[in-house]
Image (spheres, grey):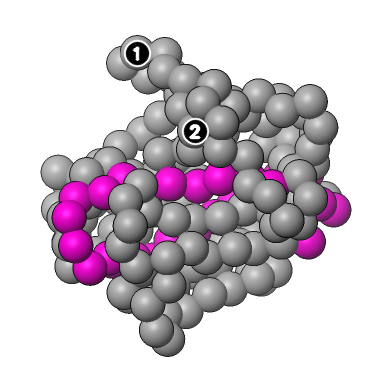
Amino acid sequence: MAINWGWGPPIQTWTYASGVAEIDFTNLGLNNRIMVEIEDVQHGSGTPDLWIQVTQDNGATWVSSGGSYVRWGVALTNQSAIVMASAIPASTATSGMLILNSFNAARKSTLSINGGRDGSASGLQQMGGRINLATGSNGVRLLWSTSTNVTAGSINIYGMP
């Protein structure tokens, strides 16, 4: 069930049908604010982080260089992706949301609030950060930090002009 919170209906959706390594959403450049909502997303092996990357050319390339994404919280760190959830065990359902403010402008701020794993509070994370880019973004990609496929779940993308 979608969160919504006044965002209107999702502008793009994805629901698991078969295992994929990355899930791309493009043509989002008309939106100043993007919310990524994940529901019961799972993977097949290991304990990877769930990452989000952005594109500035509708998916031809994805921003993945170190220092492009800055996370703050316990310690300021430069990363090659937004870490939406950390060290997720295989076959563990993860739900949460990520809001990207000023998505189609330079230097976006982010806020990520993630739900617990399998309904527990042990996986709860809250963090913020920014994306260091000279121009705006027009797409987002979800992927795991190691080579594993998404094996369950759904994703909704909401946008505001």
- Which residue is at a point 26% across and 49% down the rendered structure image? 48
Total marks shown come to: 2
Within 10 angstroms of label 2, few (less than 14), some, or many (20 or more) residues?
some
Q: From the viewer's perspective, tell me whether residue 35 is left or right of residue 82.
A: right
Is residue 128 at all visible to an observer of this figure? Answer: no
Task: State the image coordinates of residue 147 (x, y, percent, origin top left).
Answer: 33, 57
Residue under pointer 1: 75
Residue at position x 59%, y 63% in the image:
24
Q: Nearer the viewer, residue 33 or 141?
A: 141
Three-letter amino acid code at the position of disc 1: Ala
Residue underneath mark 2: 80
**Horizontal side of residue 88 vs 132, given as left or right:** left
- Residue 156 lies, in percent from the top left, at 55, 67
Which stretch appears magenta?
27-55
22 left or right, relative to 33: left
- Residue 153 or residue 143, whichever sits in front: 143
Secondary element at image label 2: loop
Vertical side of 41 occupied by 33: above or below: above
Quarter occupied by residue 149: bottom left
At x 65%, y 70%, the residue is 12
What type is the residue that disc 2 sits on?
A: Ser
Q: Residue 10 appears at what percent x and percent y? A: 64, 69
The residue at the far top in this view is 75
- Label 1: which secondary element: loop
Q: Nearer the viewer, residue 44 or 7?
A: 44
Report the quarter where the N terminus lies: bottom left
Quarter residue 69 falls in = top right
Whether label 2 touches label 1, CB < 8 Å: no
Residue 133 shows in the view: yes
